[in-house]
Image (cartoon, rainbow, N blue to C red):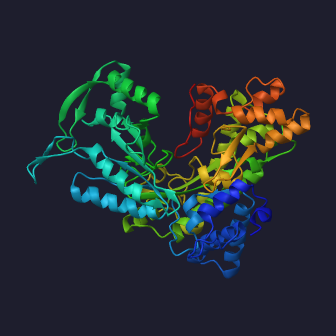
Amino acid sequence: MAIASQLQLPAHAVRVLQARFLRKDASGTVIETPDDMFRRVAAAVAAAEAVFGATTEQRAHWEESFYELMRSLRFLPNSPTLMNAGTDLQQLSACFVLPVGDSMDSIFDAVKHTALIHKSGGGTGFSFSRIRPKNDVVRSTHGVSSGPVSFMEVFDAATETVKQGGKRRGANMAILRVDHPDILEFIDAKTTVSRLNNFNLSVALTDAFMDALANDAGYDLVNPRTGVASATLRASDVFASIVDHAWRNGEPGIVYIDRMNGANPTPAVGPIESTNPCGEQPLLPYESCNLGSLNLARFVVGELGRARVDEAGLRAAARLAVRFLDNVIEVNHYPLPEIDGLTRTNRKIGLGVMGFADSLIAMGIPYDSERAGQVAESMIQIVNDAAVEASQQLARERGAFPNFLDSVFGRRGDEPRRNATVTTVAPTGSISIVAGASSGVEPLFALAFKRRVLDGAEWTELHPLFEQVARREGFYSEALLERITRAGRIGDDGGVPHPWQEVFQTAHDVSPAGHVRIQAAFQRHTENAVSKTVNLP
């Protein structure tokens, strides 16, 4: 199939589409083009319009609008939507949180439900904080508990045997409160590299713990079965252990659980206790969320190096994307009735961005600069404001989300909105490759590198904007390409003028403060959270 020329997609994007997204027949042969995929998804999502009384002509209008939005690579939904929309599976959400209670029935129900979600292409988050600690009493058997970390091994083994949608390995988030008696075992759980490889781990830090840390004081560990303090630890010792393990192997991360619940839009429904696997989507137990991302590189116009943001275009695309994501909730086939019910009553969606680093390059702005932070905040404010406006418009058409009156919005008299949350910045791993965009809000990982795929093919890729600038400014050479491919970055290469060295920064060229500056700028106008890597030397 001549699918690369049809949409002018790079070879690696075509390979990802063929491997993960395009439909195949029983023999594994690809039977649709990328154009077919976008049409399939657009038709399936536009079908929701009929639920709200749209005519055939109106439904066709929205199908065409969604199709053009995706085909232009200005917006792509999360991977399960691309994979499953318009198929028998029709499970379109990426993010789920499941409850794990303190009983064998609850734990193994959660294992079963995890397998169903991973099979359909989703990722799962859990809090294991309700499980009684290791060596605690189990009255029904007159034995002792093995503790939350041992049960995490069961979830990990189940995940290992089930690939997400048969196309990618499952992912999990495990969260344990810092005041759980087994917290030190949890912090140490991934010191052995062969253990819990299908989990990201995060410690839920409480305000009380942070106060103890600030005052170099102790804090209580509380048995979740009894609610009674069982021991005291010094907060600074625990925090030092978290930092040391994170430095050694990147885990555990930390989640400010009280801060997160302070921003919970539906506290009357229940507390947030976990997030999705990459941490950007806090959810209630049995809640799900579907995500999508606008490609910011498609919303800068003008000469390379001096471009500007197309604010009107970005605003219009954000509004259309919100309608798309709300429609997804309507046509989604959820893996559990509990998830179906809670998702529909809160109707959370997560519109985010990708291609931020590419957009900065187009504007000639270094990633590690005050100006980049200003641009980041401006762009995400446009997206968030437009998303809220679109959600309010949908509420006028379709009604507010059912829990609106009991939500923080309803209680303070805000205008009704269709969705409890509207924005999330996800890492956009696969979809950014398809879109030919830098991932999420990250800087470029490398300017040039050798890409290898499973079939053994290998080729050198040079970032297209760098090649354009290098040829235009007259410093392109095969020797330069070879040096950058080896290093992945420009470094102190004398052949590249200093201003362009600044503009084409890669992840390890950016200071830790520069990474945090960008994350903070995006978080100021994001209703959920921002997935971001902070690289350290």
**Where is the C terminus found, in terms of image quarters?**
top right
Residue closer to the observer: 536 or 450: 450
Residue occupying the point 67% across, 58% down: 15
Give the side of residue 444 with respect to residue 277, left or right: right
Q: How many marks?
A: 0
Q: Is residue 431 above or below residue 1?
A: above
Q: Is residue 342 left or right of residue 299?
A: left
Splitting the image into 4 quarters, where does residue 224 fall? top left
- 408, above or below 480, in the image: below
Compared to residue 194, the image places residue 158 above or below, namely below
Residue extending furthest toward the bottom: 56
Considering every residue shown, the one lying at the far left of the view is 142
Rendered residue at 21%/54% (across/down): 103
Residue 420 percent location from the top left of the image: 50, 55
- Identify the residue shown where x is 49% and y is 46%: 278
Residue 330 visible to an observer of this rendering: yes
Q: Position of residue 529 (x, y in %)?
A: 52, 43
Residue occupying image coordinates x 75% and y 55%: 10
Residue 359 coordinates in the image, percent (x, y): 75, 42
* Position of residue 453 in the picture relative to residue 261 (left or right): right
Name the outermost residue toward the front: 456
Judge whether residue 394 can be spotted in this image: no
Q: Nearer the viewer, residue 296 or 453?
A: 453
Where is the N terminus found, in terms of image quarters?
A: bottom right
* Residue furthest out toward the top: 216
Residue 47 screen position, x and y as percent: 60, 75
